[in-house]
Image (cartoon, coloured by chain):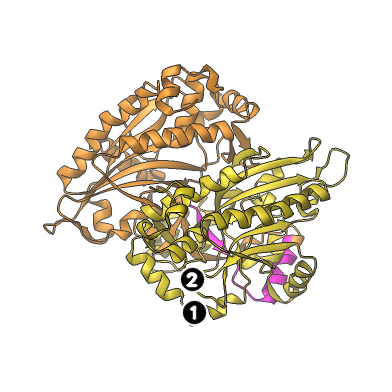
Chain colours: A yellow, B orange
């Protein structure tokens, strides 16, 4: 899964240039504030940049040809409970609750609502959770034995993470384009390593010179510190980083992740020869890439270098 | 807002042909079950049909030129509380809850989780709600005075409705493409009426012969019955319907809605001359359109009429 940025960054946000770039983006009509920190509508040019970069990434991932699947922004609570997210990232979760009561109970809830009291306690958990990483919904559908050579899957969709922030690059809901590999350890590692170069080249082709750094997911709490250290030590996660609002604290706009047997074990996925499947993924954070493009090349397409516009197909 | 199908349909589902078509779709790889009723991944061809129809609709709505905005699948709880959804459709809502506690409270929640108890009560309501209709997030951003001639906005995105069902056409999360008009009553009505013809023509161009019927939203409970009757009597909502799983109960694949001053009043939007703005929208249910196309023309593109594939740009 692809989680960008460590939790420690949150404390530093306000001292950085987030507010200034955010204001520019809003004034240019690229982002539309929605009244909640980290929640934005996307203006026409912002969306166009995302669509064009998304098409570029699709082409980059077309060989060897992957299966194409698209999952919605929610997935099954029962599967959520199998991936360890409640242990590692409880504060990022989005759990969907709804009203399942009677007419009378509805009147009671409306009473609380109208008196300005908390009405959310009248709701019950539904079977849906927000998707924290867009490859999570894939693994439960892959239960069973993989074909020889494993599988490659092209995914794109919305992920949700509850981390309200003024950093325009830390949205609560955003799109990722991922290429996932399921197979042997060697197949998974080869995928991760291939994309470390291929991803850097994709970014370079649109004028984004990224650094590749070993990183860790923002594991929760005291216990999480050990997991962060292990993840770094084993170099399981690499990020493509580039300055957006700050040169000292560059932003991750993509990542390459080797999950070991985490998902293979959770969802009983095995390789053709009966071993537990390993997996790896590369993820491109589409909103963050757009933010990096507008930061690097300017807020209007007219100011973007001709060669970048040609690569993206922006007229 | 665009809600399709009345609540009464739910009771009739199991007696109809939903299961058979659902099985065909899954076997053909068009839909990918996700372990929850009404929740599916989309296969490559299904997604391709949606993308191509979406592009067709974009062209149909390009004159007069609308603003283009894209909102994510969530919006602000404070704005949710202004639209009346909690009164009218509480059972369809999706309220996002998350964990905001300490390390110690996290251990308590994990204890409940591991004992198989309900851990959802340890969560708190966040500031986010699922978007029940994709034009809802727009109206709060339009607070203030409209320019002369009002506004036209092109929207596309995910909507969520909690209505678990075996009917493949009743997904819990699905995409809509909408064109919204904000302005005087005459401007709103003209928009609604223009799209009653234009929408039918768009559907006809891809071989979908729809009926246009006066409809009502699935208002909740006993009180809702009165509102349904009023909505029908005033003919505020029209649906484009076509048989998908049943000829007796055709499915709405689009709708044209006149909201009167509902959103103008809720979000203090006024026309250039100071009156409360009225609004109208046309909505195309993209997953339902794809289901209608595969039902009408066959489960493989090869069997679709040449002229339909040409209109959609499907090779």
Query: In front here: B190 or B53?
Result: B53
- Is residue A51 something one can see in this rendering? yes
Q: Quadrant of residue B34?
A: top right
* In this view, the mark in front (1 or 2): 1
* Magenta range: B92-113
Whether residue A203 appears in magenta in the rendering, the answer is no
Q: Is residue A199 left or right of residue A245?
A: right
The reply to whether discs 1 and 2 touch (Cβ–Cβ < 8 Å) is yes
- Label 1 Cα crowd, 10 Å radius (few <14 / some 14-19 / many 20+): some
Residue located beneath label 1 in the image: A16
Mark 1–mark 2 distance (CA, rounded to whole Å): 9 Å
Q: Position of residue B174 (x, y in %)?
A: 49, 42
Q: Which mark is residue A167?
A: 2
Query: In front here: A121 or B78?
Result: B78
Q: Position of residue B2 (x, y in %)?
A: 36, 41
**Chain hosting mark 1:** A
Q: Position of residue B51 (x, y in %)?
A: 47, 36
Query: In front here: A290 or A162?
Result: A290
Question: In the picture shown, does residue A244 fall above or below B302?
Answer: below
């Amino acid at each position: 899964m692809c989680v960008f940025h460590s939790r420690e960054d949150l404390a530093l946000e306000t001292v950085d240039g987030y507010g200034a770039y955010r204001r520019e983006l809003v004034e240019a009509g690229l982002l539309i504030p929605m009244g909640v920190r980290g929640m934005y509508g996307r203006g026409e040019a912002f969306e166009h940049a995302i669509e064009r970069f998304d098409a570029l990434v699709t082409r980059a991932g077309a060989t060897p040809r992957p299966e194409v699947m698209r999952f919605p922004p929610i997935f099954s609570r029962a599967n959520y409970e199998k991936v360890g997210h409640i242990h590692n990232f409880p504060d990022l979760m989005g759990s969907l609750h709804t009203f399942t009561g009677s007419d009378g109970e509805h009147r009671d809830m409306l009473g609380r609502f109208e008196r300005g009291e908390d009405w959310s306690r009248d709701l019950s958990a539904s079977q849906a959770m927000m998707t924290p990483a867009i490859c999570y919904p894939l693994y439960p559908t892959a239960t069973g034995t993989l074909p020889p050579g494993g599988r490659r899957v092209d995914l794109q969709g919305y992920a949700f993470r509850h981390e309200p922030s003024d950093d325009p690059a830390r949205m609560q809901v955003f799109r990722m384009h991922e290429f996932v590999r399921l197979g042997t350890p060697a197949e998974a590692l080869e995928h991760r390593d291939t994309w470390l170069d291929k991803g850097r080249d994709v970014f370079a082709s649109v004028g984004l010179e990224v650094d590749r750094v070993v990183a860790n997911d923002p594991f929760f709490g005291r216990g999480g510190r050990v997991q962060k250290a292990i993840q770094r030590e084993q170099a399981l996660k690499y990020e493509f980083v580039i300055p957006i609002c700050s040169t000292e604290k560059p932003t991750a706009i993509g990542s390459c992740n080797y999950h070991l047997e985490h998902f293979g074990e959770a969802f009983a996925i095995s390789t053709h020869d009966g071993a537990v499947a390993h997996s790896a993924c590369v993820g491109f954070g589409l909103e963050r890439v757009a933010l990096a493009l507008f930061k690097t090349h300017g807020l209007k397409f007219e100011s973007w270098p001709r060669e970048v516009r040609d690569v993206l197909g922006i007229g």
